[in-house]
Amino acid sequence: MKNMSSPEINIQTLKKFSEFTFEIRQFFHSQNFLEATTPTLVECPGTEPFLEPFATEFRFGKKIKKFYLPTSPEIALKKLICQGSGSVFEIKNVFRNNELSQHHSPEFLMLEWYRVNFSIEQIQKDIQELLQSLLKKKSFSISKKTMRELFLEFTGFELTPSTTQAEYYSLALKNNLNVKSDETIEDLFSLIFLELIEKKLDKDVPLFVTDYPPFQAAYAQINNSGWAERFEFYWKGLEIANAFYEVTDADEQLQRMQKDNLLKRSLGKEEVTLDLEFIELMKKGMPKSSGVALGVERLFMAIHNFQDIQTIFCRDY
């Protein structure tokens, strides 16, 4: 906590943000999306190994049940898709413990949407058209580069889907990054990308980064070339959105969630209860779909040139 006094609220900023979220909702309603309201107390907050959820308890008489605050509405929204909702979106407060910086807040708004029976390229089009709508422009150009192209441009390294942990480690040493020989392949990739690539991206050029290594797939499908079918959207020095062409096979989904928990355990983090209801719904049939999670405050920051995410709501952690 910084101090005991309440920070001063900027009413004009709040008005701008209110108009901003209203326009986002208008955009998705005009595209015939269903707007959802999903639970905030959940048994499974998401299994991403490097996210730390907030935990709480529900008490009712002698009954005590553990719940989490969601790190994302992803599982809840996908349950709706499995039950025939069609394309769906939500603007939701989400929570991530042990995160605080100019670009990170333990509580923030996430815009998440899923397009049923559409490819991941349609999500890119959605982002482009959403920006056109918010900026009141007839066009908004977004560049696109593969992860392979970025590695080649900024490190001279020829990245492939089968690049090994040893090769990432060697590349890190070659570029004088502080690494240990037992670093995981995930840690090595993230460090190289952050230090040698992400920091050097042109902040003024909106960019889709596509085709991630397979171990970075999360819940994305792997294409015939071996790359994960996902992209991230960068602008103004911010990672704003993360999108996937979603896994639809229930057994594959369960294996990835179990793998996430194993990695959590190896990292000394608490494993989470898996949402087996979600898996059962997937077994009944999850349609082909693409989805994306977008940081609402980060997009607002990029458009209005804010430097600190906490100043939008004057949060004082």
Image (cartoon, rainbow, N blue to C red):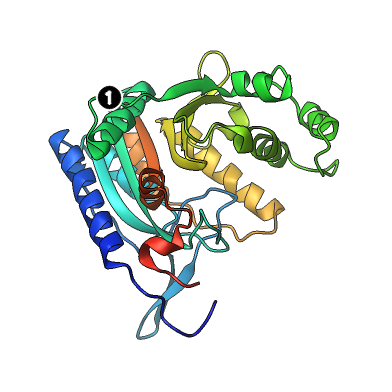
The N terminus sits in image quarter = bottom right
Q: Residue at x 52, y 37 (%)?
A: 218
Q: Residue at x 47, y 21 (%)?
A: 144
Q: Decide if residue 251 is on the left or right side of residue 34.
A: right
Circle 1 Cα neighbour tier, 10 Å, few/some/many (<14 / 14–19 / ≥20): few
Label 1, secondary structure: give it.
loop
Three-letter code for the amino acid on which mark 1 is drawn: Ser
Q: Is residue 103 above or below residue 158?
A: below
Residue 299 lies, in percent from the top left, at: 38, 45
The residue lying toward the viewer, choosing from 93 and 22, is 22
Residue 81 lies, in percent from the top left, at: 27, 38
Q: Residue at x 42, y 51 (%)?
A: 275
Residue 303 in view here: yes
Residue 315 lies, in percent from the top left, at: 43, 69
Query: How many numbered marks does the figure carry?
Result: 1
The residue lying toward the viewer, choosing from 239 and 301, is 301
Q: Decide if residue 65 is on the left or right side of residue 176.
A: left
Residue 295 lies, in percent from the top left, at: 40, 48
| Mark 1 lies on residue | 139
- Report which quarter residue 141 is drawn in: top left
Q: Is residue 302 above or below residue 13?
A: above
- Report which quarter residue 69 is drawn in: bottom left
Residue 42 in view here: no
Q: Residue at x 70, y 40 (%)?
A: 191
Q: Is residue 169 above or below residue 148?
A: below
- Report which quarter residue 270 is drawn in: bottom right
Q: Is residue 266 above or below residue 117?
A: below
